[in-house]
Image: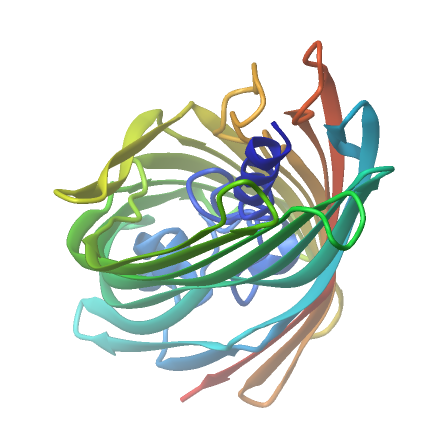
Amino acid sequence: MPVVVCVGLLLSLADRAQGDASNRNFLPFGERAAMLANAGITSDATEAVYYNPANLARVGQSELSVSGSTFLRFEASSDAILELQGVDQPFDASGFVVIPSTIVSTYPIGDWTLATAVLVPDAFEIRNRVTFETPDLRITQLLDQRRQSLWLGAGAARMIAPGLSVGLSAFVTNETEAEINFLRLQAGDPASAILEQTTSTEVSVFNLSAIAGVMWEPTPQLGIGARIHSQTLRLTGSGDIYRSVIQLGTMMDVIAEDELEGVRVGRPLPWDAGAGIAYRPRPDLELVADVSVQLPATLTTVDDAIAGVTEHEVELAPRAGVGAEWEFSQRKWLRLGVTYNASAVPAPEAAGDGISEDYLGVTGGVSWQKDRTTTSLGAFYLQTNASMIIDGSDPPREGELVGRLYGALFAVSYSL
């Protein structure tokens, strides 16, 4: 039983703080929207190529925008993440991530505005060692996991009527993952049975996706936008998996290795749709609000003749962002926002079902323009009180994992 519990724990820890279909767009992202709680559907900044390409038509001039590194620290803790031989085992983990820069360029050409983009909307890294102990059992786990999304694409937008624009963006995305998991289980004194399991996984997937948007400004004080993000189309994807098991000190020692190369894998995303509104009660103040929803789907992450088929369900997942931008001085802006991001993972009913994480957070920052350059500095804080079933508990009982993410934001744009 302890070995089964530990393997389940490895799978649970590997899903920490994801920005994939479980919690889509939960990290602050973009030049302006990042400080407005990701409320970017009505934004006329270059980030429109991602949030709503119709707004590219409102940029008005050629621009080069660089959204600098997001310096992110995360913490996760639980009073009991699993139960071993009737003893609750606490858990703590932390890490630091630097998300690379993103670059967007816009080019007005006739009645059209074109854009090219290199985006990194999601990156995550964790290195952690944790030990669980009971009077006659000791378990140590080493985890090193890295993942990143790289989006390369272009967008186009056009004003089709006064105050009404439409746009479309298309991206080729590369989702990469690398993970090493080492588990050591020792029963009793040092001379007793020992089990060691090592798993190494490397995955690279190329997908194609598109974003369509519309923006309507019926009056100078009001703007209404909508976007739809297509499900991803897998272009190619493969993974290499290595696993070794060493079991000593039992009636039959075991030393085994398995290696699979070129496993057919995917990292799909479902359909996603959203709407936003911007209201300007006075010239120096703009209020924005976005509501989006990721649609339910059955996602296939492994579909291989040898490795088999792995599927999981995601539920309808809403998210929302509300923000305010105040021009407190000429060409100087204060931006604040509140965000909510609901988990697409169903509430767990049994150990191994995963962890359901709903994020709530705040964002803020300042921007100032000097000549042709606009600089933005900001910060954010996100927290989740995730629900899970404690592995090994009998009878099964629910536990809570508290996660905190906070960091800094930086962006620079230049009007050409």
Residue positioned 69% across, 25% down in the render: 390
Residue positioned 59% across, 90% down in the render: 371
- Residue 126's place in the image compared with 106, above or below, is above
Q: In which image quadrant can residue 296 be found? A: top left
Q: Quadrant of the C terminus?
A: bottom left
Does residue 361 appear to the left or right of 276 in the view shown? Answer: right
- Residue 56's place in the image compared with 11, above or below, is below
Q: Quadrant of the N terminus?
A: top right
Does residue 146 appear to the left or right of 272 in the view shown? Answer: right
Q: Position of residue 373 (x, y in %)?
A: 56, 86
Q: Position of residue 160 (x, y in %)?
A: 19, 51
Residue 351 shows up from this direction: yes
Residue 334 shows up from this direction: no
Count all numbered tags in the image, as a single digit. Answer: 0
- Residue closer to the observer: 252 or 99: 252
- Residue closer to the observer: 52 or 253: 253
Q: In which image quadrant can residue 82 be found? A: top right
- Residue closer to the observer: 324 or 316: 316
Q: How is the image coloured?
A: rainbow
Q: Position of residue 151 (x, y in %)?
A: 33, 66
Residue positioned 57% across, 17% down in the render: 350
Q: Position of residue 116 (x, y in %)?
A: 28, 74
- Residue 215's place in the image compared with 87, above or below, is below
Residue positioned 24% across, 50% down in the render: 265
Which residue of the protein is positioned furthest toward the top in this rendering?
395
- Residue 149's place in the image compared with 37, above or below, is below
- Residue closer to the observer: 146 or 62: 146
